[in-house]
Image (spheres, rainbow, N blue to C red):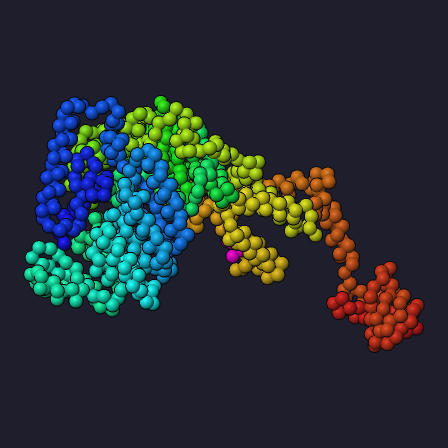
């Protein structure tokens, strides 16, 4: 076997063997019968190249039909390559294969109508914590998909398997069926028969068949990954490296000269596995790539010609959200909530964000950009930013977070707007671009960062070996590339001094915009939308929720709720105060619940806190753990109800936490003022004054004290006389000194009325009497 050079780049723009890139670098097959074939092919290519050079000299300058090179874009439309990314969740089953064949078949038919060449990138994805389930790909489904990928319908197109994680089971067969294999540093390929109790001959034949067709991985290596009974050795002969079984080694010794001792690649009774770096060293794969952005750069596919394919969707279900005017927190909250509702309710898979804004709030723009690029799955929801007029300052970040940016003729992207960005804002935006947005869009981040950082210098770079493929990097992004040496610097496209601002034509030229349209109708035609997308507008319920969730209304709800609760505690029964308190707290948590900042945790904490306080006030004496704990639970529930996090971890969350504290502080001040006002003026208000118990007046207090003194019976009453009014047996009643009092016969004898008695002893509230002896 001839060993290929370990180049970093992969020339994919080809027709199964010979590249059609302008540079005409050949992609040679992996096995050749003899060196004569190589020499002959080189001669043919030389003749073809000479003929093309003469044709170019005869034609002079390139025609005006050719476009200027853009970000990762080749100069000629005929030679431009488009990428389609299919994220395949393992295991592969019959329905999964059917969906892939249907979508790929439709794309191939569309490409044939446009005479376009496609590169299909199959990204194998293992769901989190489902490694054991992911190995159970069905052999029949995988073989069916492999046959489709190697069939005549795919002859003009290229398939690339991207393996960022360990892949096992029969999904290996699908990877073998691809033209090229790229792995992540943590990737692994092998153990194809791990879920099989018995390896049947048809399985072995299928793996041999795919290995022979693609010649990416040798036959014996492919079979060794399937059958644990097979041992595979690495043998260096006088002309090439071979991968053989022990039985084949003996025959090879008779035919070739063996250099050194054979090395064991796969041991017997062990399923063969190839780690990423080992596979690269053995020249089984084309390159290592950390992420999809690097894969696209290695394949030299322009980011603006790449699309994620939704394997679950059949047609676009579009919605439209508007970001108009200065960006504010409530507008971003509304946009996120409306999109979430549309996806959940209508299964929307196409979100068009119409942006006509000067910016205004970097923190809120970061929130919306993060939601669009991170929370919406790229293979489920297509996001498109449409800029009819302007997207200035931080509004440009929202556009950059979308899969595609479409601009109307004359529209402006980037530049100074409604806010002056601080160094902290710039750092947060650039960090989000590098760590979050690039993962979705696969575009280089330097030009976008230059819209916010005036000190950033961005240079145009040409890729060595393909002068028409260009990209734009700052020094930091260039240094982060794994193949820095493959890029040659050109002109400076953005010098330091001011932020980058581009009009539609320039944005298209730099790759910041995908297309330029004359209006929204053309955008609809561009994406094949039958009707206008559903405009997501706030309903009356949304307006009510926003009003109730505003800090000012929240303060008043808390004030009225606490005051109503205190009024209820001071009056018997369930009255106006209890009804007012219940209504205010229900409205407070309802608005927070629908605004998705509160859940059952906050409600549970609040209810538990109120119960603890009631226990402390009415059941457990003193102010102890229930009172203190209940108060803290109520405060914690009110704070958490205004935010989506527990502990603030960034500047935005810290600001939200401060806002929650401001609401509580305002409510506390309002509660104190309201209680003082109620105590002073409420008792004097007609009708309303009856709600609370009024304290006795000064005259009433003096009269009460006098009555209390007069009603007290003590030892001074001893000797006073009166008459029995109710028989004493031995207790009863007697009228003494004009008062009817309860008395007890001294000797516990029976005394009938109207016997005259006198008081002989007073013990607390018991008065003892005896008959008067005449």
Does residue 631 show up magenta in the picture?
yes
Viewer-proximal residue among 178 and 377: 178
Q: Please provide percent x and percent y for residue 698.
A: 71, 46
Q: Residue at x 39, y 51 (%)?
A: 96
Q: Quadrant of the C terminus?
A: bottom right
Q: Is residue 196 above or below residue 333?
A: below
Task: Give the quadrant of residue 118.
Answer: top left
At horizontal 40% and vertical 38% (from top left) the residue drawn is 383
Q: Nearer the viewer, residue 103 or 523?
A: 103
- Judge whether 489 appears above or below 203 on screen: above
- x and y, in percent, of residue 723 in the image: 90, 66
Q: Principal SS element in the magenta part?
A: helix
Q: Which quadrant of the figure contains the N terminus?
A: bottom left
* Residue at 10% in and 50% down: 34
Confirm whether residue 74 shows in the render: yes
Is 213 magenta? The answer is no
Q: Note whether residue 376 is visible.
A: no
Q: How far across and down, in percent of the image, does residue 121 sit?
A: 30, 45
Magenta residues span: 628-633
Residue 275 in which image quadrant: bottom left
- Residue 634 shown left or right of residue 456 in the figure: right
């Amino acid at each position: 076997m001839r060993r290929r050079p370990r180049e970093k780049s992969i020339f994919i723009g080809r027709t199964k063997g010979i590249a059609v890139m302008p540079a005409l670098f050949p992609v040679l097959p992996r096995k050749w019968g003899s060196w004569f074939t190589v020499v002959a092919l080189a001669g043919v290519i030389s003749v073809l190249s000479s003929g093309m050079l003469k044709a170019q000299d005869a034609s002079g300058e390139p025609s005006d039909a050719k476009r200027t090179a853009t970000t990762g874009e080749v100069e000629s439309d005929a030679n431009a390559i488009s990428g389609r990314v299919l994220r395949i969740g393992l295991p592969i089953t019959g329905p999964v294969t059917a969906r892939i064949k249907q979508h790929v078949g439709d794309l191939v038919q569309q490409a044939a109508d446009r005479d376009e060449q496609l590169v299909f990138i199959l990204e194998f994805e293992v769901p989190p914590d489902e490694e054991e389930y992911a190995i159970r790909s069905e052999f029949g489904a995988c073989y069916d998909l492999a046959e489709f990928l190697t069939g005549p319908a795919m002859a003009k197109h290229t398939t690339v398997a991207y393996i960022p994680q360990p892949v096992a089971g029969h999904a290996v067969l699908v990877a073998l069926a691809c033209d090229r294999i790229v792995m992540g540093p943590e990737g692994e390929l092998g153990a194809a028969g791990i879920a099989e109790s018995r390896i049947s001959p048809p399985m072995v034949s299928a793996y041999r068949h795919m290995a022979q067709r693609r010649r990416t991985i040798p036959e014996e290596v492919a079979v060794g990954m399937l059958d644990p009974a097979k041992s595979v050795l690495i043998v260096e002969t006088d002309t090439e490296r071979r991968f053989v079984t022990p039985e084949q080694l003996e025959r090879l010794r008779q035919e070739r000269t063996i250099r050194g001792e054979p090395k064991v690649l796969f041991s017997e009774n062990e399923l063969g596995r190839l780690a990423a770096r080992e596979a690269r060293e053995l020249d089984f794969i084309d390159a290592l790539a950390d992420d999809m952005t690097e894969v696209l750069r290695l394949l030299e596919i322009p980011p603006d010609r790449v699309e994620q394919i939704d394997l679950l969707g059949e047609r676009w279900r579009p919605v439209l959200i508007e970001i108009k005017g200065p960006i504010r927190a409530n507008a971003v909250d509304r946009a996120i909530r409306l999109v979430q509702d549309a996806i959940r309710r209508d299964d929307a898979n196409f979100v068009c964000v119409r942006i006509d804004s000067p910016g205004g709030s970097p923190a809120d723009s970061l929130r919306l950009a993060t939601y669009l690029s991170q929370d919406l799955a790229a293979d489920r929801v297509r996001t498109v930013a449409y800029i009819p007029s302007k997207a200035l300052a931080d509004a440009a970040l929202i556009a950059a977070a979308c899969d595609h940016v479409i601009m109307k003729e004359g529209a402006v992207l980037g530049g100074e707007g409604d806010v002056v960005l601080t160094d902290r804002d710039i750092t947060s935006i650039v960090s989000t671009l590098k760590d979050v947005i690039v993962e979705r869009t696969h575009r280089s981040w330097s030009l976008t960062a230059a819209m916010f950082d005036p000190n950033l210098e961005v240079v145009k770079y040409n890729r060595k070996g393909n002068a028409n493929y260009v990209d734009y990097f700052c020094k930091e992004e260039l240094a982060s590339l794994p193949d820095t040496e493959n890029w040659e610097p050109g002109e400076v496209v953005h010098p330091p001094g001011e932020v980058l601002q581009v009009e539609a034509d320039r944005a298209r030229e730099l790759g910041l915009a995908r297309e330029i349209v004359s209006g929204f109708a053309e955008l609809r035609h561009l994406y094949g939308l039958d009707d206008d997308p559903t405009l997501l507008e706030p309903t009356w319920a949304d307006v009510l929720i926003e009003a109730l969730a505003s800090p000012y209304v929240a303060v008043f709800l808390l004030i009225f709720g606490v005051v109503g609760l205190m009024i209820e505690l001071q009056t018997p029964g369930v009255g106006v105060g209890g009804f007012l308190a219940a209504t205010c707290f229900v409205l407070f948590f309802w608005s927070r619940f629908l605004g998705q900042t509160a859940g059952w945790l906050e409600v549970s904490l609040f209810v538990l806190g109120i119960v603890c306080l009631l226990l402390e006030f009415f059941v457990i004496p003193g102010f102890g753990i229930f009172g203190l704990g209940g108060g803290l639970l109520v405060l914690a529930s009110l704070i958490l109800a205004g935010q989506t996090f527990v502990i603030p971890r960034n500047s935005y969350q810290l600001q939200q936490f401060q806002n929650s504290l401001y609401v509580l502080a305002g409510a506390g001040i309002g509660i104190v003022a309201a209680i003082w006002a109620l105590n002073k003026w409420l008792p004097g208000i007609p009708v309303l004054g009856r709600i609370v118990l009024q304290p006795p007046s000064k005259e009433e207090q003096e009269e009460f004290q006098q009555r209390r003194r007069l009603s007290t019976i003590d030892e001074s009453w001893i000797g006073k006389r009166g008459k029995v009014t109710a028989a004493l047996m031995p207790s009863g009643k007697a009228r003494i000194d004009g008062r009817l009092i309860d008395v007890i016969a001294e000797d516990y004898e029976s005394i009938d009325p109207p016997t005259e008695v006198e008081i002989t002893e007073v013990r607390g509230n018991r008065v003892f009497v005896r008959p008067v002896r005449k």
